[in-house]
Image (tube, grey):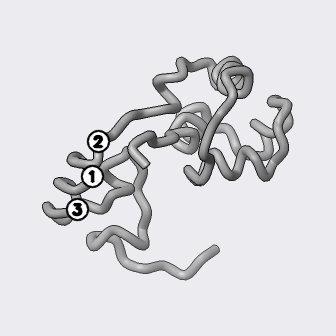
Amino acid sequence: MPIIVNLDVMMAKRKMSLNELYGRVDLTLSNLSILKTEKAKAIRFSTLEAICKVLDCQPGDILEFVSEETKTTNRQHGIAASRAYGTQNAANSPNLKRCRPL
């Protein structure tokens, strides 16, 4: 999907956990998790507004458009897709050693 949800990035910048955001926004924890993991198909403006108020950010800080061409180009150059979108996933990165989960 060409719309990327950077909720995890904004939460990290604000040093806020999913549970803390859940306590401050009128959404279920499972719906916030769906947004955070980019599995959501849609978002209401009222939901986006509430999240932006709590995180003190703009909608463009949470939502990002990335063309399919950009995604294809990044994959061809060996860049992990998650890294290209501002997040780092150790499982996708060739430069990070695998670690035992905490």
**Location of residue 29 in the rendering, given as x and y in whole percent from the top left corner:** 81, 48
Amino acid carrying label 3: it is Arg
Cβ atoms under marks 2 and 1 closer than 8 Å: yes
Q: Which residue is mark 2?
A: 67
Cβ atoms under marks 3 and 1 closer than 8 Å: yes
Q: Which residue is mark 1?
A: 71
**Location of residue 42 in the rendering, given as x and y in whole percent from the top left corner:** 62, 38
Element type where label 1 sits in the image: helix
Give left or right: position of 85 versus 11.
left
Element type where label 3 sits in the image: helix
Question: Across the whole image, how many numbered discs are drawn on residues?
Answer: 3
Disc 2 to disc 1, C-alpha distance: 7 Å
Q: Residue at left 27%, top 52%?
A: 71
Cβ atoms under marks 3 and 2 closer than 8 Å: no
Relative to 10, is 70 above or below? below
Q: Residues within 10 Å of mark 3 (few under 14, many from 20)?
A: few
Which one is nearer the viewer's eye here, 10 or 64?
64
Where residue 48 sits, quadrant-wise, is: top right
**Location of residue 66 in the rendering, given as x and y in whole percent from the top left corner:** 33, 40
Element type where label 2 sits in the image: loop
- Give the number of the mark in front: 3 or 2: 2
**Location of residue 39 in the rendering, given as x and y in whole percent from the top left corner:** 59, 53
Q: Which residue is mark 3?
A: 75
